[in-house]
Image (cartoon, helix red, strand yellow):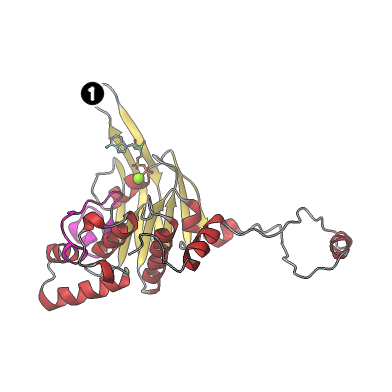
Amino acid sequence: MDAIRTENLTKKYNLGWRKGRFLALEKLNLRIPEGEVYGLLGPNGSGKSTTLKCILDLITPTEGAAWIFGVPATKVESRLHVGFLPENPYFYRYLTGGETLEFYGQLCGIRGAALHRRIEELIELVGLAKARDRRLAGYSKGMLQRIGLAQALIHDPRLLLLDEPTAGVDPIGSRDIRDLILRLKQMGKTVLLSSHLLAQVQDVCDRIGVLNLGQMILEGDVDQLISDQRRLSFTVEGLPAGGRGQIEQAAQAAGAKVVGVEHPQTTLETLFLDAVRQDKRGAGEHD
Ligand SMILES: Nc1ncnc2c1ncn2[C@@H]1O[C@H](COP(=O)(O)OP(=O)(O)O)[C@@H](O)[C@H]1O
Ligand SMILES: [Mg+2]
C-alpha cells in the first residue's frame, strides 16, 4: 500500500484583495510506497513545504486530494501514524531535552512507565543522552533538529514527514541526521523529506522528485538518475610510465573514446569530516 498518494494536488494562495492568487503547487501526483525514503527537492519557494502541509491537511488544497495509508488526508485518523518535523520547529527554550519529549509524549496520550521507556529509547536513538538534562536554549541547531526528530517519533509513527531536516546544520550534524534517517528506514519507516541541499539527499533517499515553480520537473530512482549509463570510469593504481598511452590505445581499438583522465577527487565534505574526526580534542560543539 502507498504510504502517501496525492492526486492533482494544487494550491493557490490568496494574496489579498485585488492581488489575485498565487499558484504555489500545480497538479502534483505523488506515490510513495511504504518503506521508502523519498526526497522532495527544489529551490526555495518551489512548493515543498506547501506539499507537506497539504498532505498533513494543515492547509486546504485548492484542487486535488491526498491520502495517507489509503485514508483521505481530510480525516483526522489519517494522521494517527504520522510524525512531522516542521521547517522551523519551535520549542520551549527553558525545558531540557528530556522534559521536551515528556511534554510531547503526554500530548500524544502516552504516560507513566511507557512514556519514560519511550523517552529513554529516543534519547539514545538521536544521540542526546549526554544532553538530555540540558536546557534547549544551549542546544546547537543540529541538536535541536535531533530533539525535533525524537519529538516526531514519540508515538512510534509509521510515516515521517521532515521539512528540511538538515537546514542550517553543520556537516557533522547533517551526517548524524542522515544516519538517523537511514536507521529509521531500517526500522521499516516511510520517510518523506524535503531539502534544497542536493548532496545530502543522495545517500539517504531511494527516490527523489524535483519541484520547480510548483511543478514536478523530474522524478526517479536516485541510483539511476545519478549514474551516467553511457560512460564508465576506471581508477587505476601503480600505473607505470607509458601505461596511460597503452590504455588509451586499447580503448580506441575497442571503438571507444577516452573523454576524461583525472586524479580522483574526494569531496570537501569528506575532507572536512575526516579532519574533524581525527582531531583528538573532539568535534566542535557536538553534544
Ligand atoms: N501563506 C502564503 N501566502 C502566500 N504565498 C505563500 C504562502 N505560503 C507560501 N507561499 C508562496 O508559495 C511558494 C511556495 O512556498 P513553499 O511551499 O514554502 O516553498 P518551499 O518550501 O519549497 O521553499 C513561495 O513562492 C511562497 O512565497
Ligand atoms: Mg519550505
The quadrant of the rendering that contains the C terminus is bottom left
Report how many numbered discs are placed on residues in the image. Answer: 1
Q: Is residue 81 left or right of residue 250?
A: left
Residue 156: x %, y % from top left? 25, 70
Q: Is residue 65 left or right of residue 32?
A: left
Q: Going by the picture, which residue comes out furthest to the front?
A: 281
The quadrant of the rendering that contains the N terminus is bottom left
Q: Quadrant of residue 32?
A: bottom left
Does residue 257 lie above or below 115 as drawn? Answer: above
Quarter holding ligand 1: top left
Residue 241: x %, y % from top left? 87, 65
Q: Residue at x 49, y 52 (%)?
A: 198
Q: Crowding near pointer 1: few (<14 within 10 Å), some, many (20+)?
A: few
Q: Residue at x 28, y 43 (%)?
A: 61
Does residue 61 lie above or below 266 as drawn? Answer: above
Is label 1's Cβ within 8 Å of ligand 1?
no
**Which residue is denoted by mark 1 in the rendering?**
17
Helix, strand or loop under label 1: loop
Q: Can residue 279 be found in the magenta stretch?
A: no
Q: Amino acid at mark 1?
A: Trp
Residue 163: x %, y % from top left? 34, 52
Residue 76 appears in the picture as rendered: yes
Q: Can residue 94 be found in the magenta stretch?
A: yes
Per the rendered image, the range of residues in magenta is 71-100
Q: Residue at x 71, y 57 (%)?
A: 230
Between residues 137 and 214, which one lies in front from this camera angle?
Answer: 137
Between residues 92 and 52, which one lies in front from this camera angle?
Answer: 92
Between residues 257 and 61, which one lies in front from this camera angle?
Answer: 257
Q: Is residue 57 left or right of residue 176?
A: left
Residue 82 appears in the picture as rendered: no
